[in-house]
Image (cartoon, helix red, strand yellow):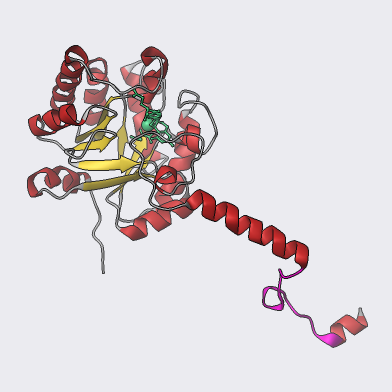
Amino acid sequence: MAKAKFTVRSFKSTKANGRRISMLTAYDYTTACLLDETGVDCLLVGDSLGMVMLGYENTLRVTMDEMIHHTKAVARGSRNALLIGDMPFLSYHISVEETVRNAGRFVQEGDAEAVKLEGGQGMVDKIRAIVKAQIPVLGHLGLTPQSVNAFGGFKVQGKDFETARQIIDDALLLQDAGVFGIVLECVPDGVARLITEKLEIPTIGIGAGVHCDGQVLVIQDLMGMFRKMRPKFVKTYADGGDITVAAVKSYIKELRSGAFPAPEHSFPVDENVLAAL
Ligand SMILES: Nc1nc(=O)c2c([nH]1)NC[C@@H]1CN(c3ccc(C(=O)N[C@@H](CCC(=O)O)C(=O)O)cc3)CN21
Ligand SMILES: CC(C)C(=O)C(=O)O
Ligand SMILES: [Mg+2]
């Protein structure tokens, strides 16, 4: 079956036709090839790569250069999915000029088609400037992991009236600033439902319940490969971690016993050549 290219236009039109948007993170070429084959709508090169690929405690140490490096790799493997680059901490906080330059790097060097950044009201001027540069922007509200120190941990956001009200207001402000969608991370399902109903653009949930217009998960979480942390919103669809450990144990066992490599994994040489040697 020939699959069609998923674009920002396709993304926006899903709200009207009711088809849910699928999004996954990808950080490398091999994974991007496999995910693109599935027909997933969007690939996000998330700054979560700092935790999943680089082993940092949170996402704050991730740099622009690291993000571009991984975005390029994913771009080479992704044909049909909409490719979104996640702007890292400090790449959009200092000035509008730096923000547009960094968003532009994702497109020009990384081959991304859109960027995502975290935050509400305070980011509106930056978002407007990126959109003005013709780069589509995805918003991100609720548990914005780059605010981990301000929040005092990875905590659900919007549980009381004031904070829920703030997230709803921010969502409307972001829509007005021109984002093509908003990621809602770790907000109560009822709050995510309200926001999804109020907005004309799609919402993408992660730990935000079933009423969002789409969902995103970290691919290593879905595959059961990231064992360090398992947020409540993660559903594991395969025992990828166990499969990897078992396969590697078999490999070690066979190489020790001499069962691997077998003749079919080896390259023969002509007997006469050997004799002459
Ligand atoms: N592998 C991975 N998956 C992710 O979803 C993810 C990352 N890494 N790194 C960046 C952020 C960090 N995220 C996190 C990390 C921890 C929780 C967590 O432990 N949440 C608690 C909720 C605590 C509360 O009740 O307020 C939980 O129990 O799920 C949530 C999101 C989501 N993102
Ligand atoms: C989980 C998604 C929304 C994200 O921001 C990331 O992977 O960095
Ligand atoms: Mg992120």
Provide residue 29's location: percent of width, then percent of height.
47, 51
Q: Nearer the viewer, residue 206 or 188?
A: 188
The quarter of the picture where residue 167 lies is top left
Provide residue 245's location: percent of width, then percent of height.
59, 52
The quarter of the picture where residue 34 lies is bottom left
Q: Nearer the viewer, residue 58 or 178?
A: 58
Position of the N terminus by quadrant = bottom left
Q: Is residue 75 above or below residue 155?
A: below
Q: Is residue 91 visible?
A: yes
Which secondary structure dominates the residues rendered in magenta? loop
Q: How many marks?
A: 0
Q: Residue at x 13, y 25 (%)?
A: 176
Say if the magenta span includes residue 157: no
The quarter of the picture where residue 96 lies is top left
Provide residue 231's location: percent of width, then percent of height.
39, 33
- Left or right? Give the position of 178 relative to 151: left
Span highlighted in magenta in the image: 258-271
